[in-house]
Amino acid sequence: MTDSLASQEQSAAGDTANVCYSNLTPSGWVDVQWWNSAACGSTFVPNTKQIKQLTGYPVGTRVNACASTYPPSGWTITSSYYSSSCQYSAVPSLNNNSWTLVRSF
């Protein structure tokens, strides 16, 4: 289920990839969705994530992302909120788990 690191490094702004939770989110990428998939093992914990490439977006671009990884350099958190798409914990809650990010430099 994982894309090769080489294909992730050659991606363009806005490209997405689905990876198992055990793969670290690469630099310049953010998590944008979590779910459970048998392809990543048998568990009740969300074990699959969609990641999005942010490198290359122009200043001022807004992106919604899960709070499961820190924003890349040059991106600022402007708001936080709850999203059912970003439940990445075995114990889900209604606490803020997502951010709106803005490219600041």
Image (cartoon, rainbow, N blue to C red):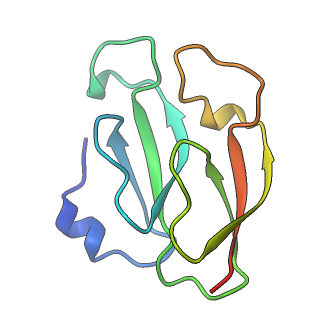
Q: Is residue 41 left or right of residue 37?
A: left
Q: Residue at x 61, y 29 (%)?
A: 87
The C terminus appears in which quarter of the rendering?
bottom right
| In the rendered image, the vertical position of residue 17 relative to residue 33, given as above or below | below
Q: Residue at x 40, y 34 (%)?
A: 48
Say which of 94 and 4 sits in front: 94
Q: Is residue 47 left or right of residue 82?
A: left
| In the rendered image, the vertical position of residue 38 relative to residue 22, given as above or below | above
Q: Position of residue 61 (x, y in %)?
A: 69, 78
Q: Residue at x 43, y 69 (%)?
A: 28
Q: Position of residue 27 (x, y in %)?
A: 37, 65
Q: How many marks do you count on the picture?
A: 0
Say which of 86 and 95 sits in front: 95
Q: Position of residue 92 (x, y in %)?
A: 64, 18
Say which of 11 and 91 sits in front: 91
Q: Residue at x 59, y 13 (%)?
A: 91
| In the rendered image, the vertical position of residue 12 relative to residue 34, given as above or below | below
Query: Which quadrant would residue 74 be assigned to in this image?
Result: bottom right
Q: Position of residue 23 (x, y in %)?
A: 28, 43
Q: Is residue 72 left or right of residue 80?
A: left
| In the rendered image, the vertical position of residue 81 relative to residue 55, given as above or below | above
The N terminus appears in which quarter of the rendering?
top left
